[in-house]
Image: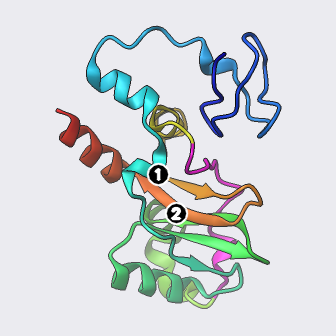
Amino acid sequence: MPLCPYCGAKVIEGDDECPECTHSLASLDLPEPASEVERALVNDRVDQLKPRAPLTATSDTPVAEVLKRMWEERIGCMLIVDDGVLSGIFTERDATQKLAADIESLATRPVSDFMSRDPETLEGTAKIVFAVQRMDLGGFRHVPLTDGNGAPTGVVSVRDVLRYLTAKF
């Protein structure tokens, strides 16, 4: 009996959705991995990447404060959390594309004016291949990890995936 790649629950062959975590199972029809690296990507879970704990702020935090904390922590994104639930993500790309040369005049505005709302997320039990897929299809450099209630638990970055792949080679 196959297992859900997100939560590890047993699923019935051909099910469209996991009965436990309700994630789509449409991508289970993947071809057999051609190499050990491909096999690892399909079998290993995101939590094996040792994702960094999320740097968080609330949606009303001034964007200048968010940028300062990102610079101090040397991190490329900050998760925006309201009432314990992820509501957005603010990244280096948001800063360069949405703030650009107007940073001084926009510094006191809330980060919610510039963040990406409702970002794609994964749970730490998801397979690494799904993180890579989300990054590729969405053009993301970061994928937030959340628990079953939408609370952030970590962030997976392209750098985490590259470190993992380097170790596998």
Marks counted in the figure total 2
> Label 1's element?
helix
Give the vertical position of 122 relative to 61 (above or below): above
Q: Is residue 138 left or right of residue 20?
A: left
Q: In front: 149, or 106?
A: 149
Residue 115: in magenta span: yes
Number of other residues with Cα within 10 Å of mark 2, as a class: few under 14, some 14 to 19, many 20 or more: many
What residue span does the magenta drawing correspond to? 109-125
Check disc 2 and report the residue beneath it.
154
Q: Is residue 48 left or right of residue 140?
A: left
Tell me how the rendering is colored. Answer: rainbow
Q: Is residue 116 left or right of residue 12?
A: left
Give the vertical position of 118 relative to 28 (above or below): below
Q: In front: 90, or 73?
A: 73
Residue type highlighted by circle 1: Asp
> Label 2's element?
strand
Give the vertical position of 21 relative to 159 (above or below): above
Residue 116: in magenta span: yes
> Residue sitting at 60 percent across and 31 percent down?
5
Quadrant holding the C terminus: top left
Q: In front: 40, or 63?
A: 40
Check disc 1 and report the residue beneath it.
47
Discs 2, 1 touching: Cβ within 8 Å: yes
Residue 163 percent across, percent down from the top left: 25, 48
Residue type highlighted by circle 2: Gly
Quadrant holding the N terminus: top right
Q: Main secondary structure of the magenta part?
A: loop
Residue 91 percent across, percent down from the top left: 49, 64
